Image: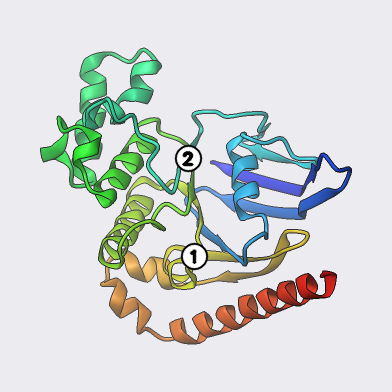
């Protein structure tokens, strides 16, 4: 069973002028297979730094990340990444983007086509598989990015503000798709977002981070992601406890932002 263990993770960036920024300090979490966790907090709390360490793009200053019993030392197909913008290959077709990972692994064409067709049908893009990426809307491109990530069959999916650039209606549809894929695939998912509502909808675990240094301020265990799998997300937002939890987290983050502004003004 997949288990992601984050132990006493710290990250310090040394600056050319001799000073340093402590982006993360003593972050520890354990995620079991099939959990979906959202992470939010004010700007500068280290959300993206944490995700980049989990992806293997950055090596932490202290601490370690273990997945399936081994240390994370760099990028690997066992961890898939979905960025805010799809980071797709625009010169390739939709199908070629999705089967890129299996193709790089040397998988036979018949097997690649089977995987790509299944995933494109799952994300509702079967009729667009031979289209060029630039012909698609932003929401459709993000669906391609999700399918391309899943084509590598990662144990963990890391998502960095994947829906942040979408309009409200498309974003809501994509939130439903993320929940559908989470439940159908059984993947472990970690999603960074600036939207409190989105964090509530897409996190059965929700971590609020505090800045300077980035650390875990509070963790919630929530029912809304499970409710949203088979329900209209607008109804989930009206369900018991949603508004109260949203307001509590908004107040928490607002207080952090006020504290940051106060520090900045005092330093001037």
Q: Is residue 199 left or right of residue 172?
A: right
- What SS does tag 2 mark? strand
Identify whether 36 is placed above or below 10: below
Residue 135, disc: none
Q: Is residue 125 left or right of residue 81?
A: left
Q: Name the one closer to the observer, 233 or 30.
A: 233
Identify whether 243 is placed above or below 109: below
Query: Quick one: label 2 or label 1, which is nearer the N terminus?
Result: 2
Residue 252: x and y, percent? 64, 79
User: Mark 2 — residue?
Assistant: 81
Identify whether 4 is placed above or below 100: below
Q: Is residue 127 left or right of residue 103?
A: left
Q: Name the one closer to the observer, 35 or 171.
A: 171
Q: Going by the picture, which residue comes out furthest to the front? A: 268
- Mark 1, Cα crowd under 10 Å, few <14 / some 14-19 / many 20+, is some
Residue 73: x and y, percent? 67, 29
Residue 54: x and y, percent? 61, 41
Q: Name the one closer to the observer, 85 or 123.
A: 85
The quarter of the displayed image where residue 18 is located: top right
* Tag count: 2
User: Mark 1 — residue?
Assistant: 204
Q: Residue at x 23, y 15 (%)?
A: 109
Residue 101: x and y, percent? 38, 24
Identify whether 166 is placed above or below 49: below
Q: Residue at x 25, y 38 (%)?
A: 119
- Mark 2, Cα crowd under 10 Å, few <14 / some 14-19 / many 20+, is many
Q: Nearer the viewer, mark 2 or mark 1?
A: 2
Image quadrant occupied by the N terminus:
top right
């Amino acid at each position: 069973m997949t288990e992601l263990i984050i132990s006493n993770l710290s990250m310090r960036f040394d600056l050319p002028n001799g000073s340093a920024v402590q982006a993360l300090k003593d972050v520890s979490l354990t995620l079991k297979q099939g959990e979906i966790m959202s992470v939010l907090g004010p700007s500068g709390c280290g959300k993206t730094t944490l995700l980049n360490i989990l992806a293997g793009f950055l090596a932490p200053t202290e601490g370690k990340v273990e997945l399936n019993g081994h240390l994370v030392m760099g990028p690997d197909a066992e961890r898939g990444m979905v960025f805010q913008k799809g980071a797709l290959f625009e010169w390739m077709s939709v199908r070629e983007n999705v089967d890129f990972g299996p193709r790089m692994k040397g998988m036979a064409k018949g097997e690649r086509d089977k995987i790509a067709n299944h995933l494109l049908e799952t994300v509702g893009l079967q009729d667009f598989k031979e289209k060029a990426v630039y012909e698609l809307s932003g929401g459709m491109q993000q669906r391609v990015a999700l399918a391309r990530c899943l084509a590598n069959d990662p144990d963990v999916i890391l998502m960095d503000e994947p829906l942040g650039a979408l309009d409200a209606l498309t974003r809501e549809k994509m939130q439903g798709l993320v929940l559908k894929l989470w439940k159908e695939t059984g993947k472990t998912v970690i999603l960074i977002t600036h939207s409190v509502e989105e964090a509530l909808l897409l996190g059965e675990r929700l971590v609020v981070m505090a800045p300077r240094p980035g650390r875990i301020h509070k963790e919630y265990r929530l029912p809304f992601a499970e409710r949203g799998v088979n329900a209209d997300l607008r109804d989930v937002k009206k369900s018991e406890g949603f508004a109260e939890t949203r307001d509590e987290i908004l107040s928490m983050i607002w207080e952090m932002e006020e504290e940051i502004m106060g520090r900045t003004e005092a330093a001037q």
